[in-house]
Amino acid sequence: MIGQTAKSLQPTKKIYALRDVTGTVESPALICASIMSKEAGGGIDALVLDVKTGSGAFMKKMEDAENLAALLVETGIRMGKKVVAL
């Protein structure tokens, strides 16, 4: 298990700021970039992602959560990581 550091959060803060000023908060590509820059950028070999859906989650519809999960997995694989999403 690893934790967040000030250095690992820098890309996330920049991406959140970009999403806010461009009105693209719900952009799957930017959500993916935010998650993967933090998760896969830390020198890991493999990653298990828990993509939630429903009224209490960011992705309200199952289809949106499945699309985000597929994007996250594809991005991780392109980064040379072993990635699965649940």
Image (spheres, rainbow, N blue to C red):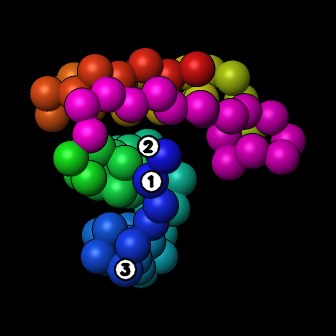
Q: Main secondary structure of the magenta part?
A: loop
- Label 1, label 2: how many angstroms apart (C-alpha)? 25 Å
> What segment carries the magenta color?
44-59
In this rendering, the count of numbered labels is 3
Is 38 on the left-hand or right-hand side of 53?
left
Inter-mark Cα distance, 3 to 2 = 24 Å
Q: Are marks 3 and 1 in contact (CB under 8 Å)?
A: no
Local crowd size for mark 2, using a 10 Å CA cut-off: few (<14), some (14–19), many (≥20): some
Residue 45 within the magenta-colored segment of the rendering: yes
* Marks 1 and 2, the one that precedes in the sequence: 1
Question: Circle 2 — which element?
Answer: helix
Label for residue 28?
A: 2
SS class, disc 3: helix
- Quick check: 58 left or right of 35? right
Between residues 29 and 38, which one lies in front from this camera angle?
Answer: 38
Q: Which residue is mark 3?
A: 6
Pair 3/1: label in front: 1
Find disc 1 in the rendering and name its residue.
2
Relative image position of residue 71 (x, y in whole percent)? 36, 29
Res 12 → quadrant: bottom left
Badge 2 amino acid:
Pro
Mark 1 neighbour class, 10 Å CA radius: few under 14, some 14 to 19, many 20 or more: few
- The three-letter amino acid code for the residue at tag 1 is Ile
Mark toward the start of the polypeptide (3 vs 2): 3
Using the image, determine if residue 15 lies above or below residue 17. above
Query: Picture coordinates of residue 32 (x, y %)?
Result: 38, 45
The residue sitting at 60% across, 32% down in the picture is 51
5, above or below 63, in the image: below
Query: In the depicted view, which residue is nearer to us: 21 or 58?
Result: 58
Tell me the amino acid under the disc marked 3: Ala
